[in-house]
Image (cartoon, rainbow, N blue to C red):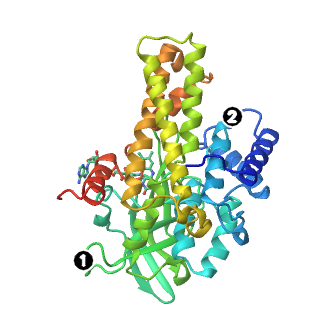
Amino acid sequence: MNLDFGPPVQAFRADVAAWLAANLPASPLPSVDTAEGFALHREWEARLAAAGLAAVSWPAEYGGRDASLLEWLVFEEEYHAAGGPVRVGQNGLFVLAPTLLAHGTAEQKARILPPMAAATEVWAQAWSEPDAGSDLAALRSRARRTDGGWLLSGQKTWSSRAVFADRAFGLFRSDPEEERHRGLTYLMFGLRADGVTVRPIPQLDGEPGFAEVFLDEVYVPDSDVIGEPGNGWRIAMSSAGHERGLPLRSPGRFTAAAARLARLWAGAGRPDDGIAGRVADAWIAARAYQLYGYQLASEPAGAAGPASGTGGAASGAQASLGKVFWSELDLSIHETALELLGPAAELKGTEASAWLDGYLFALAGPIYAGTNEIQRSLIAERVLGLPR
Ligand SMILES: Cc1cc2nc3c(=O)[nH]c(=O)nc-3n(C[C@H](O)[C@H](O)[C@H](O)COP(=O)(O)OP(=O)(O)OC[C@H]3O[C@@H](n4cnc5c(N)ncnc54)[C@H](O)[C@@H]3O)c2cc1C
C-alpha cells in the first residue's frame, strides 16, 4: 500500500492545519451540554462552515468540498490533533446527512443540508424509546396519516443534545397492522413544534446531555418523510451503518487521544510498571484503526467521493467491527490515563480533569450507536456466518 498521499492531499492537510491554528478558540469551550456551551459550539460550527470546513466530504452545492474519503480522514486527523471542539451537529452531519445524500429528495438535500452545515439548524437523533433500545423494531411511537402529512405521537428518549437542538429525525410506526420491521416510516420534525415537549435528563456529569421527547399529534408534512412511507427500517439501517462506522468516530479522534496519552506517560517520567505496554497497545490500536480507514479509502468506493457523505466508509455489518473496536479502544485509552494521573484526575477544571470527563463519556461508547453485545451478535451472524 502506498501511504504517500501525494501533493494535493498534503496541501489540503497543510491548509486545514493552518486554518485551525489561526482560528481555534483560545481556550476550551464550556461543555456542549450546557446552554452557554451549546451556543458557543454553534458559533464555532458557523465559522467552520464559512471556511468550507464543516462538512468537507459533502458535495460543494450543499456547503461541502467534494472531498474524497482520504481527504476527509486527513481533515479529521488534523481537527482532533489540534484539539478542535466537539461537533455539536454530529448527529446531523454524520448520521442524517449521509442518509439524506443516499435516500433524500433533491428538495430535501437543498433545504436541509446547508443550514445543517452552518449549524443554524442543529439536529438530534430521536430513535430510542423507553421499551425500544437494542430492540429498536419494538418502537411504538406512531405516525398517523392526515391531509398532506402525518401526525406523530409517542415518546422518545436518550436523545443527545435534544434539549438545545432545533430538529430531530426518527422512526415511527405508520402501519400498526404490519410485521414489526415493516410499517415504519423515517420522519423529521421540529423540536419546538406544537405538541412537542422536551424534558432534559442529566448525564453522569450532571449536565443535561440527553432529553426525553414527548410527541402529541405533532404535524409533519409529507416533504419531511425520508424515502417511502413504510420503508423506514431499511433506511434506518443505512443511518446506523454511518453511526457505527468511520463517520461518527473517525480514526483521527483516536490517534490524537493515543498521542496525548503517550505525552502524558512521558510527562509522568515514563513509568515502566506494565503501564508502558498499555500506552503502546493504545497507540498501536489507534494506528491500526487509522490504517483500516486508509484501506477503505483506497477501495474504489472510497475514491468515488461524497456519494454517501464520507465516500466509501464502512457501513452495514462491517461497521459493527469498527464500532466495537473504537469504543473499547476509547475506554482503554482513558482508563490508562486515569491510572497514570491518580487522584489528580479528580480535580475539576484542570487539564487533568479533561481525562476524567473523557473517561465518563468513553463509558457510554459500548452503549450508544447500538450496544457492543448487539454488535458482536451482528458480527457473529453476518460477518463470520455463525448460526443465530
Ligand atoms: C451517551 C449516549 C448517547 C445516546 N444518544 C442517543 C441519541 O441521540 N438518540 C437515541 O435515539 N438514542 C441514544 N442513545 C440510546 C442508545 O442507543 C441505547 O441506550 C442503546 O441502543 C441501548 O438501548 P437501551 O438503553 O434501551 O438498553 P437495552 O436495549 O435495554 O439493553 C440493556 C442491556 O441488555 C443487553 N441486551 C439487550 N438485548 C440483547 C440481545 N439481544 N443480546 C445480547 N444482549 C442484549 C444490552 O447490550 C445492554 O447491555 C444514547 C445512549 C448513550 C449512552
The x and y percentages for residue 255 are 56, 37
Picture disc at residue 288: none
- The residue that mark 1 highlights is 179
In depth, the one of 112 and 257 nearer the eye is 257
- The residue that mark 2 highlights is 28
Residue reaching furthest to the left: 387
Above or below, comparing residue 247 to residue 324 in the picture: below
Q: Quadrant of the C terminus?
A: bottom left
Above or below, comparing residue 181 to residue 280 in the picture: below
The residue sitting at 77% across, 49% down in the picture is 11
The residue sitting at 50% across, 57% down in the picture is 198
The residue sitting at 52% across, 60% down in the picture is 299
Q: Secondary structure at mark 1?
A: loop
Give the left or right position of residue 12, taking residue 368 as reference: right
Amino acid type shown at disc 2: Pro
User: Mark 1–mark 2 contact, CB under 8 Å?
Assistant: no
Amino acid type shown at disc 1: Glu
Give the class, few, some or many, for how many residues have Cα within 10 Å of label 2's Cα (few <14, many ≥20).
Answer: few
The residue sitting at 42% across, 30% down in the picture is 332
In depth, the one of 54 and 200 nearer the eye is 54
Q: Secondary structure at mark 2?
A: loop
The x and y percentages for residue 251 are 54, 44
In depth, the one of 126 and 336 nearer the eye is 336
Taking the image as drawn, is residue 28 in sight? yes
Residue reaching furthest to the front: 1
Q: Quadrant of residue 37?
A: top right
Taking the image as drawn, is residue 352 in sight? no
